[in-house]
Image (cartoon, rainbow, N blue to C red):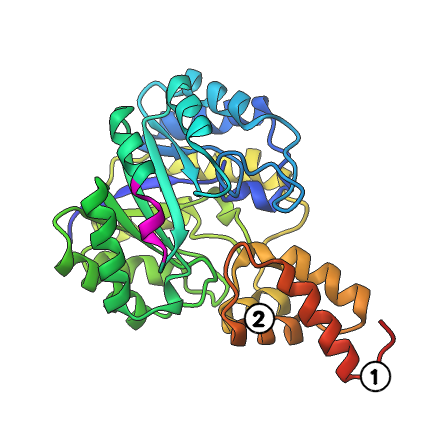
Amino acid sequence: MKLPRITDTTLRDGDHAVSHSFTPEIVRKIVQSLDEAGVPVIEVSHGAGLNGSTIQQGFSVHSEFELIKTAVEMAKRAKIASLFVPGIGTSTELRKAAELGISVIRIAVHCTEANVTEQYFRLAKELGLEAVGFLMMSHSQPASVLAEQAKLMESYGADCVYVVDSAGALIQSAVRERVSALKEALTIEVGYHAHNNLGLAIGNTIAALEAGADQIDGTLRGLGAGAGNAPTEVLVAVLNKMKLDLGINLSILMDTAEEVVAPLMPSPIVINRDNLSSGYAGVYNSFLLHVRHAAEKFGVTVSEIMEELGKRQAVAGQEDWILDVAVKLAEQKGLKV
């Protein structure tokens, strides 16, 4: 098994879990610690990617460009990455992030929509950035479809393509199948991004490595959307146990997770009923807050809404379905809406 490259995405995926409230001071502390520990890539942006501070995705307390600038200034060795979702971000934000000094852009789309990424991969390469493809909601399509979509991204200039378990819905065998399919189809690197809704974030990440993944993700304390991500500190500890020494200082990671990240968390990230129902139904993790609000408003349960959204195969950008589903469920129960 080869040594993977780890990207810590606490300051991007974790942004969801703290309601987009990261401050420059927090970014300074976390980047400094991750950089000192030897983490090679640190992702910083709004949780929904560049330009994600909107009424639909959630407004940021501080400008993400201020946070990116702080991260670039603090990193002595690590590369700073940002997430970019076509339709949320535009070429303007991508250019601005590059001007501020990011080294890596991670271009994310639903796993059947790679065809909309071409102009952004081309632009990323013009700007001298490492360009990584993110196939979100990868549980929703068979491995063969993911491989074809990944090949499109490779043809556009991607340096790596990720299998992204946005709903935390995959099990180990499904991870191995998908990562293996991409390894067979591509000449570039393959990555894996886990969520923990089924309690499998670490196990699935190891399964991805066994299938040949070159890049993996984690967040300190597992801070992330839904039931969170593979905790970076736990992931490094497990890899050390497996004799895969990445040269990352585990003590620094543990201290930062405990002393900096844990106090930021409004509540511990656990696999509760809502998170489990989201992963089981295969619903995008960032839907959860909106689903909770709709469930309370219309007198139905989160699980009922999640089940129906899963049947509809809802994807990012279809948050308007949440209210539609909640209203229909309430009407079926004879509740006043």
Q: Position of residue 268 (x, y in %)?
A: 62, 52
- Which residue type does callout 2 highlight? Leu
Magenta extent: 113-118
- Mark 2 closeness class: few <14, some 14–19, many ≥20 residues within 10 Å: many
Q: Is residue 125 above or below residue 182?
A: above
Residue shown at 79%/65% (left/top)? 296
Q: Is residue 146 found left or right of 48 in the rendered image?
A: left
Residue at image position (32%, 32%) is 104
Q: Is residue 58 above or below residue 66?
A: below
Q: Which residue is mark 1?
A: 334
Labels 1 & 2 near each other (Cβ < 8 A): no
Which SS class for mark 2? helix
The disc labelled 1 sits on which kind of residue?
Gly
Residue nearest the viewer, comparing 73 with 317: 317
List x then y, in percent, for residue 240. Answer: 27, 47
Residue 57: image quadrant is top right
